[in-house]
Amino acid sequence: MNYPEHILHQVEKPGRYTGGEWHSVCKEWSKTPLKVALSFPDTYEIGMSNLAIPLLYDILNRNTDILAERVFSPWLDMENLIRERKLPFVSLESGHPVKEFDILGFSLGYELTYTNILNMLSLAGIPMLAAERGGDFPLVIAGGSCSLNPEPLADFIDAFVIGDAEEAIQDLSQAVLDARNYNLSKDQMLRELAKIPGIYIPCLYKAEYNPDGTLKSITPTAPEAPPVINRRILPALPPPTVKPVVPYIEVVQDRGAVEISRGCSRGCRFCSAGIIYRPVRVRPAAEVVSAVEGIMDNCGYDEISLLSLSCSDYPGIENLVKTLAEKYADKHLALSLPSLRLTPDSVGLVNVLAGGRKSGLTFAPEAASERLQRVINKLTSEEELCDTACTAFESGWTSFKMYFMIGLPTETDEDAAAICQMAGRVNALSRGAPGRRPQIRLSLASYVPKAHTPFQWEAQLDEESLYRRADIVRQGLKRWGIKVSWSDTKMSLLEAVFSRGDRRLGKVIYTAWQKGAKFDAWSECFNFTLWQEAFDECSLSPSFYAHRKRPLDETLPWGHINAGVSAEFLKKEYARSVEGQDTPDCREGKCHACGLEKAVAECKNRLHGK
């Protein structure tokens, strides 16, 4: 047991900290040359539901020279005890202090976890600023979707992995091993790491700013550092993990998971994932079936999620689901597809998955008016929505939930009112449902502009305007008693700040953490006052980053990170959005020359009609 038993009796969910789960790997510490702590800056339940952790855990532990162990952010009660009792912050597998590892790697999936990174470094006794960490401390690295704009965390992270991490993490680990064998200093090691494709070393770059506060340039300060860092792109998905660690306690995604495809080519202009995970790579159906069998046999799960950005676009998804349902009918396997397009066919597919369990369906039109749908390049006609709802109600589904965004570029009050009209039609259809009338629910999210998207130059709508648009929707739905939930606007503001921010924000993050900011993604912990004070003390304004529309020729903080999709393509898509023109899925027609044709053979062949 990693922490004293009397300590664990004092905390909520002690199973977060005990380790020893089924399939966890504990190698002999003294005989393994390289020690890696895979860290997730949120609770055990969230981190153990993240797909990247088991994948990298499996890849690294298959190397006899590397041990990989897990570290999660302790909840407030456990953190207090660690600090009060001056206990070491330790890994789950061996219970070794985090600061004794060679590499400490963070998975970055959400901007509001940034203060937790600092908190974990502090608990471990590791200097938070990269410039203050010598070679006696772990190399602190980070990867994941947020690393595509690494600048806000540049003060704290030694190396970022840009893009698909499966190969890059192995190259980086081997380079660290080689550096140790040659007794290289930390500075020498970082220069060697900078030579690896997809590895960004922020300390080897200098940022300069214009008098108006905008970025002037980011330039390398060492010959080993390339002026542009190209995203690592795997040509095909690696074998899936079929022996993941099985938690002792219930986690958010308490089921097995198989990634059936990676990437999406539909081109929704608000979606960063649709850009930074391109191109689409599909796992063969036979491999999916084999992986499902392996997870069931090895882990005992009777529920499996088939993961993709758009499961509906998986070739032969109906046959795959049918095959799995028939093959494991005697084991009562439950399958879930968490990302389906809004069509009647999707309901039919989910009917096969659900069997007799039919509670709720969720779809995401995002926008209601045809005009705004063309702006964001996600077309969902009201007729298609109504046909989908009718099919769901006739099939016995008792809840129908819709996700919309407010504050999208060019949105008007009329576009917000269209949400009410669309939801009203669905509500009217629910009256004719057989049996108990289904409950209609609606969720609103404040739009957050993201780096590497056609809307990366757009401003986030100010809070007053967001409230007005939300009130239009809420007042319009009152007559039908439709429940509406809405995300916290101040959380969305911070997300917008950090998603498109520069490295000056590092001092804001540090100051906010010093004031007590942590677990900012949790509503019960989020305190915007701390952040406002931090911005004021650092003489920076969140509105400068979130509410300012940027000229197309402005130097962007992430401009030296090449996600594979060119700035020229993003500008062209931005112009088409202003003109209200949609862009078809490139897999259903011609190649749009987004930039990937320069790096991906399949895209190049499609461009030239091969």
Image: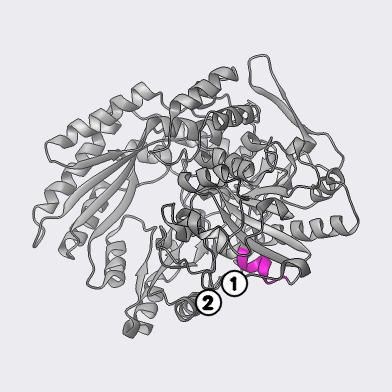
Mark 1 and mark 2 residues within 8 Å of each other at the beta carbon: yes
Query: The magenta stretch spans which residues?
Result: 57-63
Work out whether residue 324 can be spotted. yes
Q: What is the crowding at mark 1: few (fewer than 14 residues within 10 Å), some, or many (at least 20)?
A: few
- Please provide percent x and percent y for residue 215: 67, 24
Horizontal relation, residue 172 to residue 563: left or right = right
- Helix, strand, or loop for circle 1? loop
- Helix, strand, or loop for circle 2? helix
Q: In this picture, is 376 found above or below 35?
A: above
Circle 2 residue: 287
C-alpha distance separating marks 1 and 2: 8 Å
> Residue placed at 67% from the left, 38% from the top?
128
Q: What is the crowding at mark 2: few (fewer than 14 residues within 10 Å), some, or many (at least 20)?
A: some
Q: In this picture, is 30 found above or below 451?
A: below
Quadrant of the rendered structure where residue 329 is?
bottom left
Query: Which of the image's four quarters has the C terminus?
Result: bottom right
Horizontal relation, residue 179 to residue 372: left or right = right
Kind of residue at badge 1 = Pro
Q: In this picture, is 483 found above or below 10?
A: above
- Please provide percent x and percent y for residue 470: 28, 31
Work out whether residue 558 can be spotted. no
Does the magenta portion include 59?
yes
Kind of residue at badge 2 = Glu
> Residue placed at 25% from the left, 38% from the top?
419
